[in-house]
Amino acid sequence: MAGRTMFVEVGIRNHVVYQTSLSFSEPSPRLEKHVEKASAILFKDLALGPGESQLTKKLSKFRANLERLAMLDKLSVTPGLNCHEAVVGIWESLERLHRWDVQRLREDPALSNKTEESLRVLALCTQHGCPLMHARDRVGFTLDYWKQYRKFKSTTIEGGKGKTWGILIDCASTSDMNMVYTPVRVSDKWLGPDLVKANPTDEEVMSATGPILDWLEPPNTLLPPAEEIKPETGLDMNVLSAPKPVDVVFMATFNPPVVVTHSVAMEIYKISAFNAPLSSSTFDNLLFPVSESANYDPSEPRVLKTLRTVPVFLGVHTGQTEPELKPHSNTLLVDKPVYGQVVTHVPISHPKDLIMMLPMLRQYAFLSLLLSNSFESQEETPLVSKPNLTNEFKSASRTTGRELEDFMSGSKGGDSPVPLKVDVVLSAHPIPRLQLLFPFRQTTAMINLEIQLDGKVHIVSDNIFSESGDEISQSKGKGKLLTRQQFAEKLEACENLGIWVEFIKHKLE
């Protein structure tokens, strides 16, 4: 299979694929060093796996990977523009930045016990992301920026059982776009040799929240002039045409798409100068879609109820090997619905556009993870034995005034259920906030959290931690003293409101 800039060769013997190789028509050191990984992925897509035969082998993965290669090939112009090389050029610059991030983390004495892979995961989630070429059975370039179980030792850059959030970088034609965007530029010089600016301006210093990177502006990539054109007058003369810019842009696709509020979507679209239509759905409805048969009014508060089984490891230091399963009755109240947007893709002109988006993307990736771990239907974890429960724990649509009063007052009605009652109030604007309420000692605990940029958890206020400031009361607690910040970091690590509540009760009750 041949295109303008590449070839895919498939070796078949006795109706079985035994070899697959990718090559490019023009030699390029930047491209050649990634060919082996791409060829291995294509071969894996075609090779027979366990239980497969020539008749049952599915080619969907091979087709998807081949289409991505073919799209870059189709948009390339020979001579003048190789889209494969344009994409790899961005990878080169961001890979230098990632190695620099890891080196800076390695120099931190507090991280001296971290392995190289753990430092890379930390840089992925807290610094400038991790650029990967041909990873996780996908041919192409991905900038990963968030991982589930990111603080677990078993989590690796390309492995682990958790979910990964990334941005796929490809190219797209501008013919279908009704706005003017900066065309692609073929270069690996998007950052200066020292990565950091030697003499930043006062304005850059005042507005900086991290290192001030030395972003460069590579020259425009222009197509060579055509051999000759005839003027409209029809005179018999040759007129040389001028070099022209390419009709191709870099396209960033969010994988998975990220649900954000309208205001955050506007910030992301502003960075990329993208004019995208905004949806009329609410933020909570995009996270937890309402069934078509439900009585749905987006202007009213919404209550969702679910029963969760929370696996708890509180005795690992005493030899506990299996989790203790605890039932929770979780209720989510969205008292002030705001409009939301599913961000799927944006054109970009420079890799710095991606870096500017990362703090907001991490913020909402972590928020969606917290909420899904508490309120999505639970299928894999076995439910503990529980009393006869009716539809009380099924997802509800919008509430009546009485239901809202019951929720805010903590009224349960009838006998107290066995599951621990955990109520969560979500406020999505201007910054995501969660208010947690649950039984604690002889009263009700109330903790107000903010999910800040980069997925940081900040405890705004509470009524269970020590009023003296940073220290937690040990009057009935277990183990060493923990600060509010340490409790916030525990939530960042476990990524589960139910597990966090059980941890707090274990430490302080």
Image (cartoon, grey):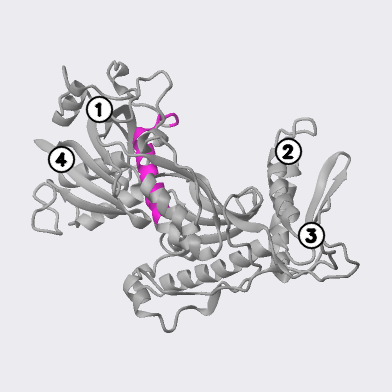
Please name whichever residue, 156 or 403, is drawn nearer the observer in this view of the structure.
403
Q: Position of residue 411 (x, y in %)?
A: 15, 25
Between tags 1 and 2, which lies in front? Answer: 2
Circle number at residue 59: 2
**Which residue is at 10% across, 36% downward?**
443
Between tags 1 and 3, which lies in front? Answer: 3
- Relative placement, left or right, of 47 versus 395 is right
Question: Disc 3 marks which amino acid?
Answer: Thr
Question: Disc 4 marks which amino acid?
Answer: Ala
- The answer to whether the residues at label 4 and label 3 have Cβ atoms under 8 Å apart is no
Question: Disc 2 marks which amino acid?
Answer: Leu
Q: Mark 4, residues whose alpha carbon is within 10 Å: few (<14), some, or many (≥20)?
A: some
Asked if residue 379 is positioned above or below residue 426 in the image, the reply reads: above
- The answer to whether the residues at label 2 and label 4 have Cβ atoms under 8 Å apart is no
Ranked by sequence position, the earlier of labels 1 and 2 is 2
**Which residue is at 87% across, 62% downward?**
234
Circle number at residue 52: none
- The answer to whether the residues at label 1 and label 2 have Cβ atoms under 8 Å apart is no
Ranked by sequence position, the earlier of labels 1 and 4 is 1
Between the residue at mark 1 and the residue at mark 3, the CA separation in whole angstroms equals: 61 Å
* Residue with the mark numbered 1: 419
Which stretch is magenta?
360-380
Query: Element under label 4?
Result: strand
Task: Inspect the magenta stretch and tell me whether residue 366 lies in it.
Answer: yes
Ranked by sequence position, the earlier of labels 3 and 2 is 3
Circle number at residue 445: 4
Question: Disc 1 marks which amino acid?
Answer: Pro
- Relative placement, left or right, of 448 versus 430 is left
Between tags 3 and 2, which lies in front? Answer: 3
* Residue with the mark numbered 3: 5
